[in-house]
Amino acid sequence: MADPISVTSGLVTLVAFTLQSTQSLYQVIESFRSHQRTVRELREELGALTGVLQSLQEMTASQNSNLAALKVPLLRCGQACKDFEVLISKYTTHSDGSKTSLRDWAKLRYMGDDIVGFKNMLAGYKATIAIAIGDANMRTAVVTASVLAEYKELISNTKSDLEEHLREIDSKLQKLSAQTDTAKEVPETKRIREERESAQRCLEICVSVSAHIDQVQSASLPNSSSSAETHEQAPFSVAGASSARNATVSALKDCKDTLAGAATHLQTHLEGLNASLGDALSQGAQEGEDHDRIREEVESIKQCLNICAHASEAVQHRTNVVEDVLAEDDAHQVAVATLGDLISVKSVKAGARSAQWLGQMSDASLQQLSKDFIRVASVEPHTKMGTKFERRYGTGHTLGPNGLDNGDTTQ
């Protein structure tokens, strides 16, 4: 007999368990062929979650990425899908493959939440897993500035959702604690506590990612008067350095604000779970099961937040600051990125007849620009007189018999 799935199971095993549970629930819901909006949206969310889990499964099978932080969220996500499948079989006895009863679907409650609440919970797990995958890929692959910005927004939104979820769970637990004997905890209380732990894990991930952003934003590279730096943005002139810095700082601020919003949303979700836990307790045995689920969800959310925080920290390392850049007269200075990092340039000075390249471009563009620059520099116009005075105080002039220039007709 195989060992039961738990947080001590291997990551590959947990991914397979969650993927199987998600696909099974999707197939059950699909079999009803319901056109109700809430049911359709849940089916679509399950399909998207399946795609993310498949990507995670491929990554865990081919890479040695450190994704152990996903264990608690994966376990809770898979268990939640299995529990919800059991609820569907219980409350859809009047439904068949050709017609779905609205009354039956309306009865569905998981930890006190309806179908929409369950769908939102799955969305938080999906986003957390996607953030963890993106964090692992970003450490080994080249990314563009646009992809980095989208990744930051995903982290921020996820953190907000998780914090809202955590607040809901806390509220449920508080109500439950006031109504139950702590020495004998019902199954529903256990679920709520586990959900709370999961939500907190997710929040910690988001916080770690956000801290990483702060770290990189405040860090600066050492002075560089003639070295090349690698950062990704369009090439810009000295006059545009200030605007580039402002754009970079603004983008980072927006990302941090979005992360804060995501954390708020997650906290609200936890409060809702806590409220559901209190309501479930007053309903007997079913309340006990919901209590257990909610507690498990709390732990899962905490782990998801940890993943978000860690990913945010990794994003911060992809932003750099270059200060006090000086190019002397007749100098040629290059600070160009061919990767996907952000760059902030401050205090840039250029001497007379100097050339500076600052920003980001592709390898091919950089090579072509270098060739063009060399070609222009080597073909400077000069007068070809072919006289012995050339290279002596200028090109010189050929004088006529009267001491005048050949082209001068005055006497």
Image (tube, rainbow, N blue to C red):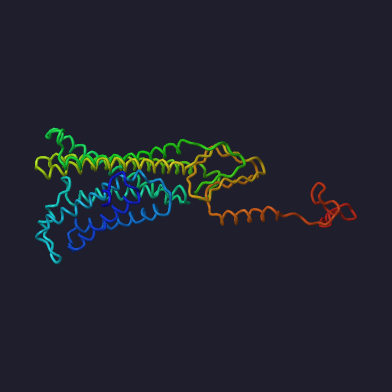
Instruction: Please provide percent x and percent y for residue 380.
Output: 70, 54
| Image position of 40 with respect to 171: above or below | below
Instruction: Please provide percent x and percent y for residue 211.
Output: 39, 37
Q: Residue at x 17, y 38 (%)?
A: 172
Q: Is residue 386 visible?
A: yes
Which quadrant holds residue 157?
Answer: top left
Q: Is residue 283 left or right of residue 64?
A: left
- Work out whether residue 32 or residue 312 is closer to the camera in this orientation and state it: 32
Give the total number of marks visible in the rendering.
0
| Image position of 404 with respect to 187: above or below | below
Q: Is residue 272 visible?
A: no
Residue found farthest to the bottom: 98
Residue found farthest to the right: 401
Q: Residue at x 36, y 40 (%)?
A: 309
Instruction: Please provide percent x and percent y for residue 237.
Output: 55, 46
Instruction: Please provide percent x and percent y for residue 79.
Output: 24, 49
Residue found farthest to the front: 1
- Work out whether residue 135 or residue 288 is closer to the camera in this orientation and state it: 288
